[in-house]
Image (cartoon, rainbow, N blue to C red):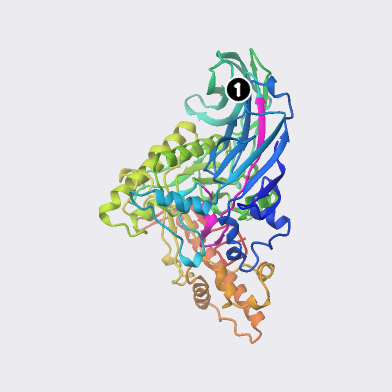
Amino acid sequence: SLRGSWRLRNGNGSVVLPGEVPGCVHTALRRRGLIQDPYYRFNDVMYRWISLDNWTYSRTFKSPFAVRKWQKVNLVFEGVDTVAQILINNITLGRTDNMFNRYSFDITSVIKEVNFLEVRFLSAVSYAAEQSRCHKAYSVPPACPPPVQKGECHANFIRKEQCSFSWDWGPSFPTQGIWKDVRIEAYNHYHLIYFSSTSFFVKSVQQWSLEIESIFDVVTSKPLAGLVTVNIPKLQTQQTFNVKLQPGEGSIVLLVNINKSSTVEAWWPNGHGKQTGYNMTTTFIMEAGHQIEKFSKAYFRTVELVQEPIPGSPGLSFYFRINGRPIFIKGSNWIPADSFQDRVTYDTLWLLLKSAADANMNALRVWGGGVYEQDEFYDICDEIGIMIWQDFMFACALYPTDQNYLASVRAEVSHQVRRLKSHPSIILWSGNNENEAAIASNWFSIPYADREIYIEDYVMLYVKNIQEIVLAEDKSRPFIASSPTNGLESVKEGWISQDPYDTHYGDTHFYDYSSDCWNWTVYPKTRFASEYGFQSWPSFSTIEKVSSVEDWSYTSNFSLHRQHHENGNDQMLQLVGHHFKLPQSTDPIKKFKDTIYLTQVMQAQCIKTETEFYRFSQSEIVKGEGHTMGALYWQLNDIWQAPSWASL
C-alpha cells in the first residue's frame, strides 16, 4: 500500500506541506493549520484559490519485494480526483481524467529498488473550462450555475462529482487529490481483478442459483487450465468447475445451483424480514501459480420493476417486487456526506444509514450529482436492509459525447457495475438525474431546430453506451435511463417523453414552495414519488459552529450567503406564515433561533402531509390516478451547515 504521508506542493512551489493519502489538498492544508475550517462563514469563496492552483503529490518508496522476480507489476489507483499526469522515476505512465474510474498502470519495466512517484494535478476548474472551449461544434448547457450558488462553470465537461462545483444546497469545493487507495501489486501467472456473485431464482425448477463472475489478468503466454471450487457450507452446496483462462484480461462465469434440500433464507428489505447472507469460499487452483482463495458473502434476492396496465387507470404501474412480493418503497435521497470525501468515515456512514433504518426507511436513492459511494456504504445497506436506487453520476445538465468522453464513461460504468453488482441492497440502476426532463421541458432554452442534436447525444450516452454496458455486465436488476421518467412509455417515445412528470407512468419529482403544504390536494397522485421536499434551517447549534455573533440573524449576509436556492429564505417564511405567527421577539438572537425552529416545524409538517398522501394513494385509483408505490423525500443528509432540504 502507498497510503500515508506524501509531499504536496502547489504550482509555483510557494506552498509545500505533507499531504495524507487518501486525501485532498483542502484537508491537508486544514490539518497543517494553513487554512481555517473551509466551512466557516465565507471560506468557500475565500479559499477559491486552492481549486484554481495546480497541485502535485509526490513520494519516494522502496520496492517491498525483489522486482525482477515478478512477471507483472502494477501501480493501481482506486480513485484519482481528477485530472492528473502520473510519473514514476520521471517517466510518464499515463493520465487520469475521471474521478470514478480505477486506474492501473503497468510498471514492470520501470520499477527500481527505490522509486520516485509523482501525481501532477491540473485544476479541475480550468480543465472543465478548457474542455468546454474545445467543444466548438455546439454548446453543451448549462454553462454556469446560477449566481446564488456561488459556483464554478462547466461541471458537465469533467467526470467529477458534479455538486463539487456547487449545488442549490452545497458549496463549491472542486477538490484535487488521491481520494481512494493506491497500491503496488505484483504477480506471476494470473491475478484476480474483480469478483462478483449475483443470485437468480429459477421458477421452472424452484431453485436458487448464483452467477459468479471472476475477471482475471493472465500474464502467461499460453492459456492456463485449472479448477475452481465454490463452497457454501450452510447450504450444503459445493461445486467444482474445470476452467481455462486465456492470456490477457478475461472473465469466467460460473453457475452454481444451490442444493435443493437446503432451505435458502432470502435477503429482505428493512421491515420485511431478515438480511441473511451466507459465507462462501471460492478457491482457484491453476496448473501454474499459487492458489487464490476468495471469501465473500452470498445473498439471495430477486428484484423486478413492474410496469403493467392497471384496471381503471390509463398508463402503466411502476413498482418493485422483491422476492416476488410488491414492496412500498419508503425512504429518502442521499447526497455526499461531506465536500471532502476523505472525511467520510465508516462511523459517519453508519450513523446516517442506521438513523434511516431506525426511522423505518427501507430505501435510499444515491443521487446522480454526487459520487458512487464507498464499499462500506453498500455493505452497511446490505446488513441493515436499505434498498438502493443507484443513479449514474450525471445530473441536471446535458453532456458531451465525443469519443474521448464516451471512452472514459464506458470505463467508469463498467468499473462501477463490476465493483457494486454483488450488493443485494442495490435494486435499480438509473442513468441520470432529471436530464430527460431537462430536454423535454427545455430548461436550457434550446431552439427547436437544434433539439435533435441533443436528443441524439442523450440516446448515445445513456442508451447506446451506459445501458448497453449495464445490461451486458449485470442481468440481475432493472435499468431505467433517467429520473423522473415515464419508464416504458419514455422508451416508446424515443427515450425523451413529452412529459416525464406524467403521473400515469414511471416516477415523478415534485416541488411547490408557494402553495400551503398542508393542502394535500396540490400533490401529484403519482405511481412513484422519487423526489419531493421542503427546505428548513439546521438547528442553531449546527450554525453556531461555522458563524460568528454578527451572523445570527435571518437577514444577515451570512444567512444569505449560505442559502443557495433562489429566494429560499423568503419561501420558508411564506410557508411558515400559512400556519404560524412569525417570531416577534425584540431580542435579535432569540428571534433568529425562533425562526430557525419554526422552519423546522414547517418542514416536518409539510413532509409528513405529503408523505402520508403518497402512502394512502397506494391502495386507490381516483380519476385514473394512484397506486403510488414509492415515496423518497428530498433529502436525507447535508453536505455542510446551511439551509437545505435535509432532515438530518
Kindly state the secondary structure of the residue where label 1 is placed: loop
- Quadrant position of the N terminus in the picture: top right
Q: Position of residue 83 (x, y in %)?
A: 54, 45
602 horizontally vs 628: left or right? right
Q: Is residue 279 visible?
A: no
Mark 1 residue type: Asn
Indicate the quadrant where residue 235 lies: top right
Residue displayed at 46% across by 36% down: 470
Q: Is residue 549 visible?
A: yes
Q: Can residue 177 be found in the magenta stretch?
A: yes
- Quadrant position of the C terminus in the picture: bottom right
Magenta region: 160-186
108 horizontally vs 370: left or right? right
Q: Position of residue 143 (x, y in %)?
A: 42, 57
Closest to the observer, 595 or 418: 418
Q: Is residue 298 above or below residue 627?
A: above
Q: What residue did someone put label 1 on? A: 259
Give the crowd class for mark 1: few <14, some 14-19, many >=20 residues within 10 Å: some
47 horizontally vs 406: left or right? right
Q: Can residue 508 be found in the magenta stretch?
A: no
Residue displayed at 70% across by 50% down: 347
Q: Residue furthest left?
A: 449
Q: Position of residue 229 (x, y in %)?
A: 63, 19
Residue displayed at 60% across by 65% down: 46
Q: How many callouts does the rendering have?
A: 1
Residue displayed at 64% across by 87% down: 586
Indicate the quadrant where residue 626 lies: bottom left
Q: Is residue 573 above or below residue 460?
A: below
Q: Is residue 510 above or below residue 239?
A: below
